[in-house]
Image: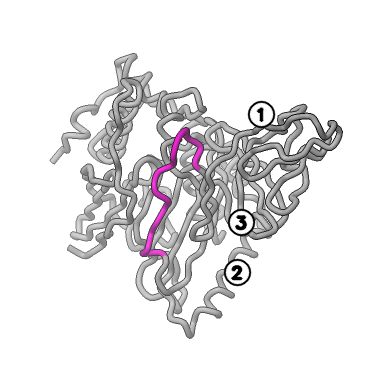
């Protein structure tokens, strides 16, 4: 039976207004409606392990550049990308206590962005009005979250389900296409039997599912029902998060399926980073050996040709995806190729959609409604930020 979501757009998009709305979802700079909407939420920008004490790094998110540094106390801070003096990049400077000093002329800024020292200026020269922007930053579950919006940030991220006993891993990857393609991919389980053959998704990719979707207090849930009655769910947490459970490992230490939570964070309109949290149910006695095997797997992947380069070769016709089926990251490689094959920014105005696109269509309608609220200066939906229960069963 065809869903209402699919029935409404089972033909090419004709309306210029609709095409403009679809395109607006892909543009995330500070002067865009989607960019303003995304700036109402916390976004991860770095893995905590990437930022040692006393180091500063340049970060780009939502088309905006900033500096993230970790003070000598271990606390991380985020300030503007450039010095107010002559525009030098602050991340090449030095961290002193909880401040950062510009490499070029030594101007120093505290974590609130206030200039506290200008060494070449006379002591009587006022520094009171010299400031650079600072950003609220939260370190949680191995990720550094930054709030890029104006005013007070929303409640900090809180996911108690990921704080319980077991092994929690954080990771990230860069993908050279627009973030919305990956966001839609997460609620498109119909691609599993094609993109993800011979992967850990073998318990799901054996048949093409029937897809349905409904809006929830946190975003939407996509339900995929196989012909044999197995039901699986994936949840989109607005605006750019995905969570589900999946058979993440055949490691004997892992009990049951693994909880997955990710964010699709635009770097700019042509590139995005995905930040991933995975919680493995591992008994304490097996934890050390499990961590060792996971570290070995990461080392194996790091020693291989970069996944993005391999994907580029496949897209150029120099190889086939199935030629790399023995890579430990074959699942991610498949997604990389499939999403980049849509183009750097997919042209959604020429699509032909059907019943299997029910969740994608619902996601777009929700986004269109939220962006319309932003344009009309009314208040968008107050979404719940929580991990819902996921259903995966035989019936």
Most extreme residue toward the left is: 1
Vertical placement of residue 112 versus 49, above or below: above
Label 1, on which residue?
A: 129
The N terminus lies in which quarter of the figure?
top left
Element at label 1: loop
Let me know if residue 161 is in the magenta part: yes
Return the mark for residue 75.
3
The Cα–Cα distance between marks 1 and 3, rounded to whole angstroms, is 26 Å
Q: Residues within 10 Å of mark 2 (few under 14, many from 20)?
A: few
Task: Give the residues in magenta.
Answer: 147-162
Could you say where residue 228 lies in the image, as x and y percent from the top left? 20, 60
Q: Earlier in the sequence, mark 1 or mark 3?
A: 3
Q: Are marks 2 and 3 in contact (CB under 8 Å)?
A: no
Q: Residue at x 33, y 46 (%)?
A: 236
Q: Residue 258: where, in percent of width, then height? A: 39, 65
Does any portion of residue 62 appear in the rendered image?
yes
């Amino acid at each position: 039976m065809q869903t209402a979501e699919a029935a409404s757009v089972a033909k090419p998009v004709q309306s210029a207004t609709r095409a403009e709305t679809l395109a607006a979802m892909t543009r995330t700079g500070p002067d865009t409606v989607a960019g303003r909407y995304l700036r109402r939420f916390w976004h991860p920008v770095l893995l905590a392990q990437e930022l040692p004490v006393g180091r500063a790094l340049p970060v780009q998110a939502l088309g905006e550049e900033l500096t993230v540094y970790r003070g000598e106390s271990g606390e991380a801070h985020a300030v503007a990308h450039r010095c107010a003096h002559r525009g030098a990049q602050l991340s090449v400077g030095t961290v002193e206590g909880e401040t950062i000093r510009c490499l070029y002329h030594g101007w120093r800024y505290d974590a609130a962005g206030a200039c506290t020292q200008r060494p070449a200026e006379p002591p009587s020269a006022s520094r009171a009005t010299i400031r650079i922007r600072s950003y609220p930053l939260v370190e949680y579950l191995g990720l550094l979250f930054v709030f890029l919006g104006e005013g007070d940030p929303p409640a900090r991220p809180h996911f108690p389900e990921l704080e319980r006993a077991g092994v929690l891993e954080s990771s990230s990857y860069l993908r050279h296409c627009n973030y919305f393609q990956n966001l839609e991919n997460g609620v498109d389980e119909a691609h599993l039997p094609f993109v993800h053959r011979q992967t850990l998704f073998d318990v799901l990719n054996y048949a093409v599912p029937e897809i349905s979707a409904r809006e929830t207090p946190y975003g939407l849930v996509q339900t995929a029902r196989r012909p044999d009655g197995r039901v699986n769910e994936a949840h989109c947490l607005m605006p750019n998060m995905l969570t589900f459970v999946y058979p993440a490992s055949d490691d004997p230490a892992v009990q049951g399926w693994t909880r997955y939570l990710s964010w699709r964070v635009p770097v700019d309109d042509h590139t995005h980073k995905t930040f991933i949290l995975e919680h493995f149910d591992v008994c304490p006695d097996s934890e050390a050996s499990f961590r060792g095997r996971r570290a070995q797997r990461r080392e194996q992947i790091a020693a291989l040709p970069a996944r993005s380069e391999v994907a580029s070769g496949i897209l150029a016709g120099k190889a086939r995806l199935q030629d790399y089926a023995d890579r430990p990251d074959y699942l991610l490689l498949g997604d990389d190729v499939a999403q980049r094959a849509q183009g750097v920014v997919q042209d959604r105005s020429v699509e032909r959609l059907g019943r299997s696109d029910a969740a994608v269509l619902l996601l777009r309608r929700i986004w269109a409604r939220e962006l319309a609220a932003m344009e009309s200066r009314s208040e968008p939906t107050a979404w719940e930020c929580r991990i819902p229960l996921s259903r995966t069963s035989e019936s």
